[in-house]
Image (cartoon, coloured by chain):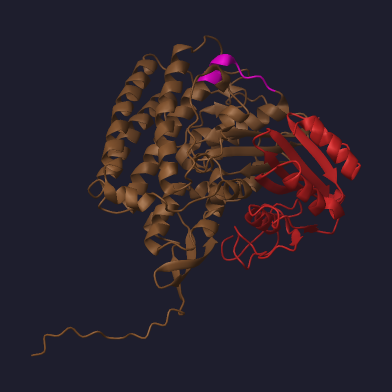
Amino acid sequence: MNTQTQVVELGYGGNERLMLNMGPQHPSSHGVFRMILTLAGETVVAVDAVIGYLHRCHEKLGETLTYAQYPSIASKTDYVAAMTAELAYVSAVERVGKIEVPKRAQYLRVIAAELQRIASHCLWLGTWCLDMGGAIGGGSTVFLYCMREREMILDRFEELTGARLLYGFHQVGGTRYDVPAGWDTKVRATGDFMEKRIDEYEAMLEGNAFFLVRTQGVGVISRELAQEVGVVGPLIRGSGVNYDVRRAEPYSSYRDFDFRVPVETAGDCYARYRVRMVEFRESIRIIRQALDGLPDGPISSRPGVKSVGQVRVPKGEGYARVEGPRGEVGCYLVSDGGPKPYRLKWRGASFTNLAVLPHIIPGHKVADVVAIMGSVDPVFGEVDR
Amino acid sequence: MTAADASTRIRERFGVEAVMADGVLSVVLPRERWQEFGRVAREELGCAYFNWLSAVDWKDQGLEVLCRVENLDARLVVMMRTRLVAGEARCPTLTHLWRGADWMERECYDMFGIVFEGHPDLRRILLSEGWEGHPLRKDYAVDTPFTPYR
């Protein structure tokens, strides 16, 4: 019997191209997203991104609902960070309508937004590590850890609003709910607990050679590309641009708080990961400061949404933006003086963040596509609106 | 580059008065100078950050295209606006200046039917290829039937 190894030539000349459909139902998209990859061997040479599977025409819907009705729908654009999506819409109405927001409501909005940032980053970290495979943190360990911690924040939101995913917390002129008795103690305890857990995540991931190899130098977004495409949030800050709406255009009393805006220059998946890990800690710091300084007073300058009174917005237009977990989320609103907006434009953070994929994926292996897409942290409700 | 410097430069180059409101410098342009202004904003005003592009349907007064670009270092926000003649939905593209204009213009085409001349790949982005009409036009009723979905 011949024991010599036989080499079979398959005749691969290197010029063949393979079209591969990734999605619309691919586990790593955490939504519905299709990429048509053109492959040379295992290397991607071109990407066509197909979006729109979750399109619900939010902008048209916004024109058919009154200013009081729409905020609870607004939370369905970015359902992973419903608090900030609602905030973007009510901020736009307040800007165009020149409606004051009491100081206490501004602080409550900050607390809610920062808790939401932690919850959203937990979901991102868990699912991203799950996508990158079993070598990272032992199968689904990181994922389950993150879900466990996110659950604590959802419990706080449930105590605050009665809901766990889509809150309806914000209303034009303030917030709908005040904090229940003893809530601040629980939030502080959650923050302290989270801080310890973040140390654990970091030890688990940054001491893992597989994690480092799969993220460092992968999916580099240059400083110039980041600005041109308009990527926001941890992506633009991971590419060396110090842009955070909380600093560039402080809203909702963010001026009162002392916090750091992390900036990394490498522009790769690891840089984006580092930015988010620092943001975890900064969010906890902001929450503590806001709880310490929570002023007394009314929580809204307008009667509650259940009252019949309409929100009166004079003729005009305006754009208001907030810093969501994924970056700048904004609403451009045109009012003709009627009870409903004349035009509502959503500027979603995930839409522009995803638009960078066709520019950065070519040249990477198929396995890296999953790591890069996870590091972008897209929420398809916000991409497709 | 401060907002005052930018206003002066815009007045000298384009003969239009830029309006400052809410921290945003609004510039109303004729359609013919859309790309020319884009180049000045990108190269001279330093607006490297492409925030968003969209449109508003003013019914019989035509469509208005809006584009918000920013110089993040100088905190300069420029809102470019141009009104298209009623019944004519064509606008020059900005894709050669900012790569981010690609998807934004595709969305604007999808929703308003504005044809961006010179766009390398202008096709629908959110709606399916066979969709009829452009939903964010004011003459598009919310309950427009679309088989087999509605």
Residue at 64% x, 46% y: name it. A59
Q: Which residues are magenta?
A: A99-107
Q: Is residue A359 above or below residue B3?
A: below
Q: Residue A62 in magenta?
A: no
Report if residue A299 is visible in the image.
no
- Magenta span includes A105: yes
Q: Residue A112 versus residue A56: which sits nearer the camera? A: A112
Please report the residue visible at 64 percent of the width from the left and 38 percent of the height from the top.
Answer: A331
Locate the C terminus of chain B by quadrant: bottom right
- The colour of chain A is brown
Q: Between B103 and A56, which is closer to the camera in this rendering? A: B103
Outermost residue, bottom direction? Answer: A1
Q: Position of residue A371 (x, y in %)?
A: 39, 53
Q: Quadrant of residue A301?
A: top right
Q: Is residue B114 left or right of residue A349?
A: right
Q: Tell me where residue A337 sits by quadrant.
A: top right
Seen from this angle, which residue lies furthest left? A1
Task: Name the residue furthest right.
Answer: B15
Describe residue B45's horizontal placement relative to residue A204 as left or right.
right
| Percent x, y of residue A298 | 56, 13
Could you say which chain is coloured red in the image? B
Extreme-top residue of the structure: A296
Please provide percent x and percent y for residue B128: 59, 64
Quick check: can you spot residue A369?
A: yes
